[in-house]
Every structure is written in structure tokens, then in C-alpha cells.
Image (spheres, rainbow, N blue to C red):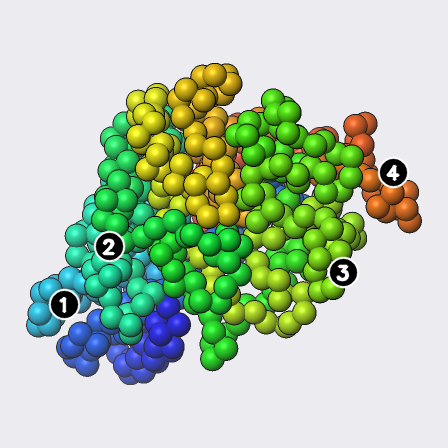
């Protein structure tokens, strides 16, 4: 994707320079008299759509698996004039996607060539509408470059917008090349697999939202779309589970591997990412909590409250013993040698006593900038989407479906956890839905999915009001600290980052975000979301 970003400034220049003082063409629209005349013109315009593809509206700190004092997580969020410009930026990108789509209709460029870039534009139109729906629910759907008189649009129903999103993603999947068909100059562009993967993500979100929120949407149809899109990615064979120590998937600078489907690429010739901004080892921006740590199975495939292998909390590192190896890939194990010293979590830099390891880079402690890529979609998510969609459709899942999805992740190099089977679940009184959700939780920990998951499952009302707990406080490891003064602990001795009385969740209010007050003032046809 570094190639794409290097061209973005060029297209921005074109957007601005083609307008005369008396020209009536909108400033962010390119005149068809000087543009849209070649494949390169369409490619330049499409490049500009990639600029905010990493725009995230939810992170794991909004859940209770990670902590940083998020007002979303603790229920103290208030409506404001802006929302970090998420609303405005999304509609700006949608307008630019629509501009490309509309100009393609009248351009003389060959149809197959145009369709590829129209497919990219329709992917991004779907991407930003889906982001808005997930955050706000009903939103205006925009499929044209708006004139001033058209700007004051009312909301469209969630179902209407989602159906149009699915249509756009299907078009994208039908008209984009596979990853294996890309030339080196196009590495990082949206592919057929990415469109299908994103279709499985959106349809799963909306299908489970419809199912658990009783929203009136067609849950079964959406879950079928999610299942079929994920299965097509699996059957196409373009991607595989990464077969190396899991940390290398996130630490290596070269992430063009078989599992990564879409990423933002960084190198030393492009803008780096500040480790502080990414929430790496020092001054961590998202501290893992006891809830996440406790969710990792023991190596016998059983939860910690049922396994004889669980070593308890006798030392800082004891709870890491005999656990799913993905726990150590996501969270630094105390005592690990780092920069020549055994690592002990600094309680002035982590509110929970745990330090996040994923996503990150061990160099983040000793360099100003690191150049590891930001992974936006990987094959593991598609496998998890498939397993969940199958189960939610049928209230059951076969061992063969588990083998092509969850068990692919459990059997990867460096993990080697016992397979999940119906017989194993029955013999140990494990709830299959719970185990499918657990697998998603631990596999995707720290990657920004958890808050979205508890929102769509409608379990946030149970999870988020709890006190935020961390590791068991070990006085011997911190002799200089006084419990109750230097560190807060609960009655069981666990670090308490935020007390229960400081947290709340209102239903249904907190299942959606408030619209920015500025947008309500500008557009009287918009109504604020319920409860806000």
C-alpha cells in the first residue's frame, strides 16, 4: 500500500488545480475535460480512497478486555460537536467514491478497465457506509455526488443501507482481481478476497445484530451471506494460516505473507508509526485486563476453572504456565528477558499489571519509529467468521466445519492446542457458542474486534458495568508500593483499575453512538439516536 500512498498527493493536487476561480465545479471533483481519460486517471482517483482505510471507530479499550479509561467503556461518553470527524470524513470518502463511479459511466476508457476501479470505489463506498451503520445505526445512504440542495438528507433505515452495502461488495468481488493476479506495483490494493472477507465481516455483524437485538432485519439471510462469503475465501485458496511463531506475524516489517489479506505498509522511505501512538510496550495505550487473561484455555483445551493444569496466582508468571500459547503472544509474560533484563510490569505505566504485546514490536522500547505494518484484515478472521455464521444459522456446527475453521488456528505452528470437537465439548460440558466466541476473543485480542463483538451479541450490558480488574497484586514483586495508596486492589487482592460504581451501561442507548451535535445543527432532517 506504500505505492498507493505515494500517489495520493498527486491526485489531491489534481482535485485542487483543475478549478478556476469562476468554475462552478465542486472543489473536490475533477473535471471530465482533463481527467478520466485513461486507466492511470482512474487509478490515481482510486488511490485517494485509500487514505483513511485505517480509520477506526472502535478499539479494544472500549471493551473490558483492555483498559485506558475509555469513556465509551465506562459509560460516561457525552454527545459532542464532533466525533473525531468520523461522520464527516466518511461522507467525504463516499463522495469521492461516487465521483469516480459517476465519471466511469461517461468515460471512453475500456469497460473492463473502468470496472476494476469502479469495483474499488464501490468497495470503499461500502466500507464507509458500513462504518457509519455500525456506529450510528440508521444513517443517510449516499450513492451520488451531492449538490448543495441534496445535502440535507434524512436517515435511511439500517436494513436499506446494509442491502446496498452488500450489493457494492458483491460487485467488488465480481470485478476485482485475486491476490495471485496482482503485479508487484499493485500490491496492497483491494482484491477479490478482501471484498469477500469484508462482506463476511459486515454480514456477520449485521446478521448477529438483527438476531440478538431483534431489530427486524433478516438475520438468516445476512448470516447466510457471511457464511458463503467466508467459505468462498476458504475455497479459493489464496490465503493460509501463518505457520511460524505468532509474534512474527505482528513484529516482522515484511508482512506480505499468506495470512495477511489487507494491511497498511510502512517502510523507512515512508512515514513511520510512532510506537507511543500504536500502544506498544512503553506507555502502553491499552492495558490487558483479568477478563481477557482468564479467557485463555489451558493446554488441555479446558478453561482455567476446570483444568488441573492451571497454576494459579502464586507468582507474577504462574498464571501464564500451561496456557494457550496465544496468551504469551498477546501479553508479555513477567520474567521474559527483554533488553537484557527480566521484564516486570511497571505499575506506573500499566493500570492493570499486564503489558500488551500484540500488536507491537519489541524495538518499540528502544527506537523512535518502527516500520511494522498495520494489519487490517487477516485470514484468521475469515475462518472465525465462517464458524460463527454456521453456528448461528444452525445452532450447531459439524466437526468438519470446525476443522476447516477454528481447528486450523489451533493447529498452527507454535499454538498446537487440542482440536475443538462436538464430543470434546459435550464431555466437558462446554457451550459450543461460548467456545466459538472464546476462540474469536483470544485469536483477535488487541486487534480492535472485541467491542464490536459484545455490541452485536448484545452482551455489553452485562460485561461493561463490571469493575475493571487486573493481575493479582504481588507485594513481593512491588515492595515499594502500598496497597490502597499506591495501587488499588479489590477484596480478593486483584488490581482494580476502575471501580464498578464508576461504570455504567444504558440499554438501548449505549448500543449506538450519538450523532455529532454539529451534524444535527447543520441538517434538521437528522434525529439524534435514542437516549442521547
In the image, residue 157 above or below residue 248: above
Q: Nearer the viewer, residue 37 or 474?
A: 474
Q: Quadrant of the N terminus?
A: bottom left
Q: Position of residue 236 (x, y in %)?
A: 23, 49
Task: Pick whichever of labels 2 and 1 is earlier in the sequence.
Answer: 1
In this picture, residue 101 sits left or right of residue 511 = left
In this picture, residue 425 sits left or right of residue 34 = right
Residue indicated by mark 1: 113
Q: Position of residue 452 (x, y in %)?
A: 47, 40
In the image, residue 370 above or below residue 297: below
How many angstroms separate mark 1 from mark 3 (CA)? Answer: 56 Å
Q: Rate crowding at label 4 as few (under 14), some (14 to 19) or many (20 or more) other CA atoms within 10 Å.
A: few
Numbered mark located on residue 341 in the image: 3
Residue indicated by mark 2: 192
Q: Rate crowding at label 2 as few (under 14), some (14 to 19) or many (20 or more) other CA atoms within 10 Å.
A: many
Identified at 58% across, 62% down, the residue is 361
How many angstroms separate mark 4 from mark 3 (CA)? Answer: 29 Å
Q: Position of residue 528 (x, y in %)?
A: 46, 40
Identified at 52% across, 30% down, the residue is 301
Q: Label 2's element?
A: helix
Q: Label 4's element?
A: loop
Q: Label 1's element?
A: helix
In the image, residue 277 above or below residue 210: below
Q: Nearer the viewer, residue 264 or 211?
A: 264
Q: Visible in this render: residue 74?
A: no
Numbered mark located on residue 484 in the image: 4
Task: Pick whichever of labels 4 and 3 is earlier in the sequence.
Answer: 3
Amino acid at each position: 500500500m506504500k505505492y498507493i500512498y505515494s500517489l495520493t498527493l498527486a491526485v489531491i493536487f489534481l482535485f485542487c488545480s483543475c478549478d478556476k476561480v469562476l468554475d462552478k465545479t465542486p472543489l473536490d471533483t475533477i473535471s471530465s475535460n482533463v481527467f478520466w481519460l485513461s486507466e492511470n486517471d482512474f487509478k490515481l482517483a482510486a488511490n485517494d480512497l485509500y487514505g483513511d482505510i485505517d480509520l477506526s471507530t472502535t478499539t479494544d479499550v472500549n471493551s473490558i478486555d483492555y483498559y485506558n479509561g475509555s469513556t465509551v467503556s465506562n459509560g460516561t461518553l457525552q454527545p459532542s460537536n464532533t466525533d473525531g470527524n468520523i461522520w464527516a470524513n466518511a461522507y467525504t470518502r463516499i463522495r469521492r467514491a461516487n465521483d469516480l463511479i459517476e465519471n466511469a459511466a461517461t468515460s471512453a476508457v475500456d469497460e473492463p478497465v473502468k470496472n476494476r476501479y469502479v469495483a474499488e470505489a464501490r468497495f470503499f463506498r461500502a466500507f464507509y457506509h458500513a462504518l457509519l451503520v455500525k456506529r450510528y445505526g440508521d444513517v443517510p445512504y449516499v450513492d451520488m455526488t451531492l449538490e448543495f440542495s441534496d445535502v440535507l438528507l434524512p436517515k435511511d433505515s439500517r436494513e436499506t443501507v446494509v442491502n446496498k452495502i452488500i450489493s457494492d461488495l458483491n460487485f467488488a468481488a465480481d470485478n476485482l482481481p485475486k491476490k495471485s493476479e496482482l503485479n508487484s506495483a499493485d500490491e496492497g490494493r483491494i482484491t477479490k478476497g478482501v471484498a469477500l472477507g469484508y462482506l463476511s465481516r459486515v454480514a456477520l455483524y449485521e446478521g448477529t445484530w438483527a438476531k440478538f437485538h431483534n431489530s427486524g432485519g433478516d438475520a438468516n439471510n445476512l448470516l447466510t451471506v457471511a457464511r458463503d462469503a467466508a467459505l468462498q475465501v476458504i475455497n479459493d485458496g489464496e490465503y493460509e494460516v501463518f505457520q511460524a511463531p505468532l509474534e512474527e506475524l505482528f513484529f516482522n516489517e515484511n508482512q506480505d505473507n499468506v495470512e495477511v489479506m489487507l494491511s497498511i505498509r510502512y517502510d523507512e522511505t515512508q512515514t513511520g508509526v510512532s510506537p507511543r501512538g500504536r500502544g506498544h510496550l512503553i506507555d502502553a495505550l491499552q492495558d490487558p485486563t483479568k477478563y481477557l487473561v482468564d479467557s485463555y484455555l489451558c493446554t488441555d483445551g479446558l478453561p482455567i476453572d476446570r483444568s488441573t493444569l492451571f497454576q494459579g496466582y502464586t507468582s507474577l508468571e504462574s498464571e501464564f504456565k500451561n496456557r494457550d500459547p496465544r496468551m504469551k503472544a498477546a501479553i508479555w509474560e513477567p520474567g521474559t528477558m527483554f533488553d537484557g533484563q527480566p521484564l516486570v510490569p511497571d505499575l506506573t505505566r500499566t493500570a492493570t499489571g499486564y503489558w500488551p504485546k500484540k500488536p507491537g514490536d519489541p524495538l518499540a522500547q528502544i527506537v523512535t519509529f518502527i516500520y511494522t505494518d498495520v494489519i487490517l484484515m487477516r485470514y484468521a478472521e475469515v475462518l472465525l467468521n465462517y464458524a460463527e455464521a454456521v453456528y448461528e444459522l444452525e445452532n450447531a456446527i459439524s466437526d468438519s466445519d470446525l476443522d476447516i475453521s477454528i481447528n486450523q488456528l489451533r493447529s498452527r505452528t507454535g499454538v498446537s492446542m487440542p482440536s475443538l470437537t462436538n464430543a470434546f465439548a459435550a464431555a466437558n460440558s462446554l457451550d459450543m457458542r461460548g467456545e466459538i466466541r472464546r476462540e474469536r476473543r483470544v485469536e483477535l485480542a488487541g486487534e480492535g474486534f472485541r467491542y464490536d463483538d459484545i455490541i452485536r451479541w448484545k452482551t455489553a450490558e452485562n460485561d461493561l458495568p463490571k469493575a475493571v480488574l487486573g493481575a493479582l497484586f504481588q507485594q513481593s514483586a512491588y515492595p515499594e508500593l502500598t496497597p490502597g495508596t499506591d495501587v488499588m486492589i479489590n477484596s480478593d487482592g486483584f488490581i482494580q483499575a476502575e471501580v464498578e460504581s464508576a461504570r455504567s451501561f444504558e440499554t438501548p442507548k449505549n448500543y449506538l453512538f450519538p450523532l455529532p451535535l454539529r451534524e444535527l445543527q447543520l441538517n434538521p432532517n437528522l434525529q439524534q439516536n435514542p437516549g442521547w
